[in-house]
Amino acid sequence: MNGYALPMPQTHVNNPITNDQFVLDAYRAAGVPMATVYLPTPSASQNADQEFDIRRKNAVALVRDQAPDRPQLAARVEEALAGFRHQEGASFVAVVTESDVVFKRTQVRPLTSTAVHVGLVPALLPLLAAQQHDIEHLAVLIDRSGADVMNRAGVGDPIDVTEVVGEELHLHRSHPGGWSQRRFQQIAENAWESNAKEVVDSIIDEFPTTDLVVVGGDVRAVGFFTDHLPARLSPPIQVDGSRQAGADAFLDRADVALRTVAAERLTDQFNRLRSALSAGHATNNSGEVLTLLAQGRIDTLFVANDFSEPDRAMGSVGLGSGEVTVPRNDGAVALAAKTAAQVIVTPRYVADMGDGIAGITRG
């Protein structure tokens, strides 16, 4: 592909992928020596404190081994890890320069081993790939008297819970028999519907930007809840659940459903790339992608989550001074972050991805 791409018509993607801006901020800091540290933080054993202390010391030692001429970098990593306790999460990720901690986060996802990377770019592709499954949503566990509304940032993330209690008192069917039974039943169902509508009204008031809802619980309450959702919301994802039994099993089923949604969104993006390649509005030649990124001409970067990627001299395209060499895919994400391009992290081997990197040009 030579010269500028022809204007590309806007492609509507029903299920877009939203990047984690905090992760991309770490990539915007690329160009100075930095250490990326992945640290498991298991807490199950009786000696968890001692085991975690050993893991921290090992991580600092790995930084010293990879950057023996930069003692301040190892010292800064040691400071960052010293302020963290193993009880705070299943794992810990940090990106540290000699002068600052540019990124740190506790994770609910466990890690099997410590990993350290020292270079001019962060090594956060695995984190970006995992977080593409983290879709902001409300998980609503409802019964005939009200609901627990859980605001979640993604799969397994900590949740804020709001309890909505309906004001209607006629919550149970009566069984008096005779001609009055239908009247009593209708009174009860009217109460259930009123309570479900109150849950919907609470969601609209408290979470006006919500666009995805997962709901489970009493079948009749779920039906009334769904009927009263406004048209601006997508149809809710329905999974089994019981408010009386607690939220754990419901949230497990919600997470399975969310992974399916995330896979569908990724498929939508692959279809978008395939169409753009056919129309001449994209390239899967890695050299062309990097050049276009440096020129700010890539709208969406597709990059494989692959630690075996080749290094690439990238000083001439905006990272560092001179011809510095960095891992190609992480360097591409750094250029995408600096030019406000969207980033889609893909599995290692995907059709239409060339040698693991592709880009849709800006129209």
Image (cartoon, rainbow, N blue to C red):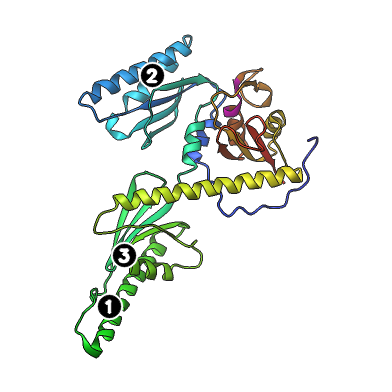
Magenta residues, start to end? 326-330
Residue 209: % across, % down:
47, 57
Numbered label attached to residue 176: none
Residue 62: % across, % down:
42, 15
User: Which residue bears the numbered disc 1?
Assistant: 188
**First in residue order: circle 3 vs circle 1:** 1
Residue at figure coordinates x 46%, y 56% from the top left: 212
Does the segment drawn in magenta span residue 327?
Answer: yes
Residue 178 lies, with reference to residue 170, above or below; the image says below
Crowding around mark 3 (Cα neighbors within 10 Å: few <14, some 14 to 19, many 20+) is some
Q: Secondary structure at mark 1?
A: helix
Residue at figure coordinates x 69%, y 23% from the top left: 316
Q: Say which amino acid is labelled 3.
A: Asp
User: Which residue bears the numbered disc 2?
Assistant: 59
Q: Say which amino acid is labelled 2.
A: Ala
Residue 261 lies, with reference to residue 26, above or below; the image says below
Give the Cα distance between marks 3 and 2.
Answer: 49 Å
Residue at figure coordinates x 66%, y 43% from the top left: 273
Crowding around mark 2 (Cα neighbors within 10 Å: few <14, some 14 to 19, many 20+) is many
User: What secondary structure characterizes most of the magenta part?
Assistant: helix
Residue 198 lies, with reference to residue 178, above or below; the image says above
Give the Cα distance between marks 3 and 1.
Answer: 14 Å
**First in residue order: circle 3 vs circle 2:** 2
Q: Nearer the viewer, residue 301 or 243?
A: 243
> In the displayed structure, does residue 45 sit left or right of residue 127?
left
Q: In this view, which residue lies farthest toward the bottom?
A: 179
Q: Secondary structure at mark 2?
A: helix
User: Which residue bears the numbered disc 3?
Assistant: 218
